[in-house]
Image (spheres, rainbow, N blue to C red):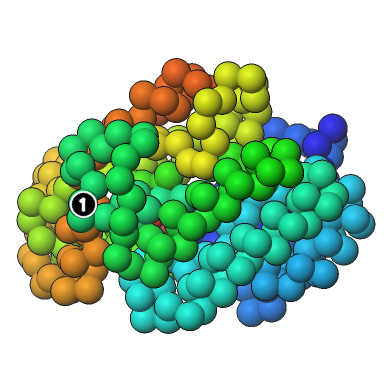
Amino acid sequence: MKNILIIGSTGQIGSELTMELRKRYPQGNVVAGYIPGAEPKGELLESGPAEVVDITNAKQIAEVVDKYHVDTIYNLAALLSAVAEAKPQLAWHIGLGGLFNTLEVAREKNCAVFTPSSIGAFGNETPKDKTPQDTIQRPKTMYGVTKVSGELLGDYYHKRFGVDTRSVRFPGLISNVTLPGGGTTDYAVDIYYAAVKEGRFTCPIKEGTYMDMMYMPDALRACVELMEADPTRLVHRNSFNIASMSFEPSQIAAAVKALIPDFVMNYEVDPLRQGIAESWPNSLDDSCARNEWDWKPEYNLQTMSADMIRILKERYG
Ligand code: AKB
């Protein structure tokens, strides 16, 4: 039996991961942690326990861990890259202060911890294509700084205190349940909604700017499979490169147009997001994840686009 706490359960990843974990571990408690103002609703609220858990409040985390005998914490509280640039102090407070609180509770109460890192943990000096697992990481954004620091802190708690910390570097995540907010890769979600609702999209990222992306079902599987992986096989922990597709705006536009022939896209580049995107890798080498815990993506740009558009057409069409 597993008892799990998800901090940030109503966000883009949390809202789907909480439901996935409740399906996978029906005997245990999968607690949806949320902050006031971002309450769980509908199935997320009705299918299991929910508690106020503010990641900046270590006592609150500890109380919920005790109440439900939590053995695993998924820490999904963070500001995304563009919003973190607008609010760097808050991004540090939540991203790093929150992670420190989580790791301290995990150390005291013997919990495993999953915390996502990101392609944002790399910077301009990093090799751009097939970025290796272990390479230079000198990001210049606050988001990137918190992600690299979080990777190091996770490894420190594992080595120094034996906390079972694990993490992946997520690419841009594409989903049809909860919208992301304030990320650099958000355009790759927004394009599907705009295509289905309006038949047109204004892209904030320049043609030719490649970034790694992933469909949410693959991302959810990555979280669960890594946390279930045999620890004796793990050479790395914080954090694994994972990848499934790399594309630039005109390629996703072509995939959408193949399914919605009247679709048109124009560009109005957002300098903040463009600058961040250009500092990130074009594509990651995920061979360590493949070798150490058998990571394998299932979706590509075409299969993801077909699924996204089918679901959004059913909802809005
Ligand atoms: C963002 O764009 O900020 C995130 C990420 C790639 O970490 N989606």
Type of amino acid under label 1: Glu
For disc 1, the marked residue is 125
| Residue at the (36%, 42%) spot, across then down | 214
Residue 100 appears in the rendering: yes
Question: Which type of secondary structure does the marked residue at label 1 adopt?
Answer: loop
- Residue 20: horizontal and vertical position, in percent? 63, 41
- Image vertical order of residue 91 relative to residue 153, above or below: below
Q: Would residue 251 appear left or right of 166 to someone viewing this image? A: left
Q: The N terminus lies in which quarter of the figure?
A: top right
| Residue at the (13%, 44%) spot, across then down | 251
What is the quadrant of residue 142 in the picture?
Answer: bottom left
Total numbered labels placed on residues in the image: 1
- Residue 43: horizontal and vertical position, in percent? 68, 55
| Residue at the (51%, 79%) spot, across then down | 90
What is the quadrant of residue 259 in the picture?
Answer: top left
Q: The C terminus lies in which quarter of the figure?
A: bottom left
- Image vertical order of residue 209 relative to residue 92, above or below: above
Q: Would residue 84 appear left or right of 105 to someone viewing this image? A: left
Residue 44 appears in the rendering: no
The one of 135 and 239 positioned closer to us in this rendering: 135
The one of 285 and 257 positioned closer to us in this rendering: 285
Q: Would residue 50 appear left or right of 273 to someone viewing this image? A: right
- Residue 140: horizontal and vertical position, in percent? 29, 65
Q: Would residue 232 appear left or right of 27 to someone viewing this image? A: left
| Residue at the (35%, 75%) spot, across then down | 85
Near mark 1 (Cα within 10 A), the count class, few <14, some 14-19 or many ≥20, is some
- Report the residue that reaches farthest toward the front: 160
Quadrant of the picture in which ligand 1 is shown: bottom left
The one of 107 and 247 positioned closer to us in this rendering: 107
Mark 1 lies within 8 Å of ligand 1 (Cβ measured): no
What is the quadrant of residue 228 in the picture?
Answer: top right
